[in-house]
Amino acid sequence: MQANTLYHYRAKSKDAAGLLATSGDFTFTTLSSAAISNGDVNGDNKVDVNDILFITKDFGKSSGYDPKADVAAPFGVINIYDVMAVVMNWGKDYASSVDTSLVGYWKFDEGSGTTAADSAGTNTGTLINGPIWTAGKIGGALNFDGADDFVNVGSASSLDDLKAYTVCAWINPRSGGENNNGRIVTKAPGTNVGGAQLMMMSASSFGLRERNTLGTGFTIQMTMPLNEWQHVCGSYNDNGDRVLRVYRNGLQGGTTATLTGTLQEWASYDMMIGGNDNTDRAFNGL
């Protein structure tokens, strides 16, 4: 068949006695063709995705075509094998607005100098002890030596005592950091007695830690490999279920940790990336 062409057809059937029945004429016009090249589908015709959900059954199977394709995402590139769950939700309602309450976003794209700009506000970070500018998963990154490097973001009011938060980072760790406790992002004193800390828990795990005013610590951790880029997050809502949560590459993990008592305030602590003001909690990696 050719694109944009009118076709006529009729149906015929014959019964056991050999009697022939013929339908009337039917017509249809084909749509313009779609070309697939390097994972891109080109064409301007509308297709209802509800009619092609069956294609997910064939993802990853051998056939005459290669189903692999890359899909751009806000945090990088993911393989279409990983977004089958998204396909299942096509056609559902989407968010009408985006939360604009982002309080900090450090891209590390400067490439030189001793400051790191905050793309979400005015909380400029200061590089301490010389972390090295390098290429990252997306744009630039900083190489922390695992000894004494970190970025001090300060303690602006917009960063203080957040009762509900999510903190995320692209990291490529070489080890668990100093004492297998390298800090990824922290707003806590140099000692290990308070504040919020997204951190390495060992050479094979990371976690999120909070404390209450009695000094009781609450920690959740999740396994992770070394020497590869991964997107890690920690979240907590003191006004909600008070459960600490961690995510790696979009998947939640770890055992449940629920904070009890009164959450310790952070206001007097500087926020730091890649370490803290102690001498034995440095992050080792990108």
Image: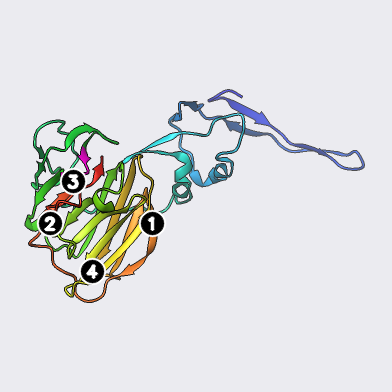
* Secondary structure of the residue carrying numbered label 3: loop
Marks 4/2: CA–CA distance:
15 Å
- Dot 1: element: strand
Which residue is rendered at x = 48% and y = 41% of the image?
81
Residue type, mark 2 in image: Leu
Q: What mark, if any, has residue 105 been given in the picture?
A: 3
Quadrant into which the N terminus falls:
top right
In the rendered image, which quarter is residue 73 located in?
top left
Whether residue 97 is visible to the viewer of this picture, yes or no, is no
Crowding near the residue tagged with mark 4, few <14, some 14–19, many ≥20 C-alpha atoms within 10 Å = some
The residue sitting at 28% across, 52% down in the picture is 180
Is-magenta flag for residue 117?
no
Horizontal side, residue 277 vs residue 229: left or right: left
Residue at label 1?
252
Marks 1 and 3: in contact by CB < 8 Å? no
* Part of the protein shown in magenta: 143-148
Decide: marks 4, 2 in contact (CB < 8 A)? no
Residue underneath mark 4: 238
The numbered mark at residue 66 is none
Residue bearing the label numbered 2: 159
Q: Nearer the viewer, residue 144 or 61?
A: 144
User: Three-letter amino acid code at disc 4?
Assistant: Asp
Q: CA distance from mark 4 to mark 1?
A: 19 Å
Alpha-carbon span between mark 3 and mark 1: 22 Å
Q: Earlier in the sequence, mark 2 or mark 1?
A: 2
